Amino acid sequence: MDIPALILAGGSARRMGGGDKPLLDLGGQSILARIVARLGPGPIAISANGDTTRFEAFGLPVLDDGPFVDQGPLAGVLAGLDWAAGLGASELLTVPGDTPFIPLGLAAALAPAPACATRDGQVHPLAALWPVACCEALRTLLSTPGRRDIRHFAEQLGVRRVDFSGGTWDPFANINTPDDLTAARSVLVRLGMEGAV
């Protein structure tokens, strides 16, 4: 089966003044719509807490963090791994919900799991391919006191780093601030991608 993908949309967006960054407009489409279009044919779910109706227009499953709410992105990854296991998948792709330029074919480029993306020396631990078999190790980590650092968990798994250097813009650039959003809109203009994905 095609590798399922999880869009991690649970951030608090403090530097953007709150709200859902994935729903911000970028060239006539939401950031989330651009990510969905770039993920390809496999099943897609959204990781988010709170009122799910804000994502209804996308027609995708919305997974909350369940008993591990407020424990950071690893809780979202675990919810995604459980969802992927229910689909009979052996791997799960995760991407942050504020990265509208993720590369096409990302899952294939990262395979086999476990692997994450790097560019120009910067590690992107949430742009990653996870083995579904790691879900119990992650559940144990979240159920006991200790670190909730995604990089630390990735190191425990022996995650490979796959380099995506080159090209004219960073495909893993995320939108954290109003200035980042302005810069992303400029990229769209330069690439002639306004209204497109």
Image (spheres, rainbow, N blue to C red):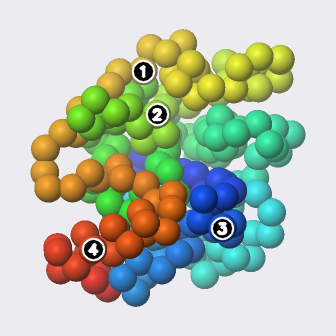
Question: What residue lies at 27% left-to-right and 37% top-to-bottom?
Answer: 119
Q: Is residue 139 above or below residue 195?
A: above
> Could you tell me the amino acid type at mark 1?
Val
Quadrant showing the C terminus? bottom left
Res. 26 visible in picture: yes
Tell me the mark number nearer the camera, choosing from 2 and 4. Answer: 4
Left or right of 65, for residue 40: left
Q: Earlier in the sequence, mark 4 or mark 3?
A: 3
Please name the residue that numbered disc 3 is placed on. 17
Closer to the camera in the image, 188 or 160: 188
Left or right of 177, for residue 85: right
Q: Secondary structure at mark 2?
A: strand
Closer to the camera in the image, 23 or 168: 168
User: Mark number for residue 186?
Assistant: 4
Tell me the mark number nearer the camera, choosing from 1 and 4. Answer: 4
Tell me the mark number nearer the camera, choosing from 1 and 2. Answer: 2
Q: Earlier in the sequence, mark 1 or mark 3?
A: 3
Instruction: Give x and y (percent) for residue 39.
Output: 38, 58
Question: What residue lies at 35% left-to-right and 49% top-to-bottom?
Answer: 172
